[in-house]
Structure formats: C-alpha cells, structure tokens
Amino acid sequence: MENKKLLVVFTSYYFGDKADKLLTELEVPHQLMATPPELYDMCGLSIQIEPSIVEQVQAILKEHKISMSGFFRYEKGKVAVAYEG
C-alpha cells in the first residue's frame, strides 16, 4: 500500500497560508500541516495533497503566483524525495 504523502512545501509562511485559503475556497482537497522534520531546511508550513491532483494544484499555484519550494514525497522517518510528476 502506498503510504507516502505528497507535500507541497512553500518558500514562506505567507505563501503557505495563502495557498491554504485559496485551495479551501476552490474546494480542492488538501490538509495544511507543519513541515515534517525531514524537510527541516524548508518553510515550516506545508500542504498535503493526493498525487492524483498534483497537476491541478500546480496550475492553481502558478496562476495565483504562489511561491513554493516544490513537491515532495514524504514518509515518516525517511528522507523526503522531490516529486517528479
């Protein structure tokens, strides 16, 4: 079973908060969360999404000029891996 999460990590708290509000408004399923320690060098705010909607989320963030560090596959206790669609 695939238990890795797909995280969108932002360049700042501001963009993470803005993305959360925008995705909520557009009814895109997501979960706002603290960035896991495995990505400690990134902003402290992330959004978790299902991999099936990654293109939709990318398009929304680009359209609204929301800056992000990238998409990462994450599994607790393991090194996060950059997501290559």
Image (cartoon, rainbow, N blue to C red):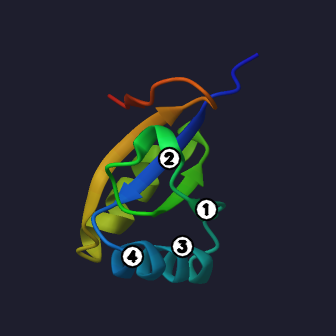
SS for dot 3:
helix
Type of amino acid at the residue the image marks with label 3: Leu
What is the tally of numbered marks visible in this picture? 4
Residue bearing mark 1: 33
| Residue at 34% in and 66% down | 61
- Residue 41 x/y as whole percent: 32, 49
Classify 10 Å Cα crowding around label 3: few (below 14), some (14-19), many (20 and above).
some
Residue bearing mark 2: 7
Type of amino acid at the residue the image marks with label 4: Tyr
- Residue 4 x/y as whole percent: 62, 29
- Residue 60 x/y as whole percent: 37, 66
Circle on res. 72:
none
Residue bearing mark 4: 13
SS for dot 1:
strand
User: Distance of mark 4 from mark 1, alpha carbons?
Assistant: 11 Å
User: Distance of mark 2 from mark 3, alpha carbons?
Assistant: 14 Å
User: Distance of mark 1 from mark 3, alpha carbons?
Assistant: 14 Å
**Of marks 1 and 3, which one's residue comes earlier in the chain?**
3
Side of 53 relative to 70 (left or right): right
Mark 2 touching mark 1, by CB under 8 A?
A: yes
Type of amino acid at the residue the image marks with label 1: Met
Residue bearing mark 3: 23
